[in-house]
Image (spheres, rainbow, N blue to C red):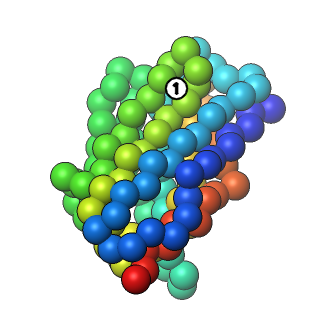
Amino acid sequence: QVQLVESGGGLVQPGGSLRLSCAASGSIFSIYDMGWYRQAPEKQRELVATITSGSDITYADSVKGRFTISRENARNTVSLQMNSLKPEDTAVYYCNIAWWRGGTRYIYWGQGTQVTVSS
């Protein structure tokens, strides 16, 4: 089994910053991708940022230049530094870990952490 635990969410004013962290534990394959997704009320879950095992990074257009994703392989963690936050960034943020093995894609999700941007 694989467990993911997110931390760092909260309430912040527009223009402020937050840092989300996610730690993975359990039976983790040696080569894996990690990422952050978010889901706002009455909207579908969307990609925020991903980082592959080779450190290739993808950002959603809406967060480019404001968010930075990073990972620490030795600790199986992924972080998301969020700057210049906007009200539209309000959502539940989920981290995930994924890998290919034997032709099968394995994906695991954290429980989510609430980020609220409001004055």
Q: How many marks?
A: 1
Q: Residue at x 37, y 57 (%)?
A: 17
Name the residue at 33% across, 74% down. Answer: 14
Above or below — where is 116 with respect to 80?
below
Quadrant of the snapshot with the N terminus: top right
Horizontally, residue 57 falls left or right of residue 108, namely: left
| The image quarter in which residue 103 lies | top right
| Residue 23 % position (x, y) | 63, 34
Image-based side of 101 in relation to 15, left or right: right
Residue at the far left: name it.
Answer: 65
- Position of residue 84 measured from the top left corner of the image (x, y, whole percent): 27, 62
Q: Considering depth in this image, is 20 or 41 the residue closer to the camera?
A: 20
Identity of the residue furthest to the right in this view: 1
Give how far across and how far down residue 115 sits, in percent: 51, 66
Q: Is there any visible trace of residue 100 in the rendered image?
A: no
Dot 1, how many residues are within 10 Å of its Cα: few (below 14), some (14-19), or many (20+)? some
Query: According to the image, label 1 marks what residue?
Result: 32
Quarter holding the C terminus? bottom left
- Work out whether 75 lies above or below 45: above
Left or right side of 15 for 113? right
Query: In x, y percent, where is residue 86?
Result: 32, 73
Secondary element type, mark 1: loop
Looking at the image, residue 11 lies above or below residue 78: below
Residue at the spot x=71%, y=28% of the render? 25
Q: Is residue 84 left or right of residue 53?
A: left
Note whether residue 75 is visible: yes
- Position of residue 7 relative to residue 62, above or below, is above
Q: In the figure, residue 22 lies in which quadrant?
A: top right
Q: Disc 1 marks which amino acid?
A: Tyr
* Residue at x 54%, y 81% (from the top left corner): 41
The picture quadrant where one finds residue 80 is: top left
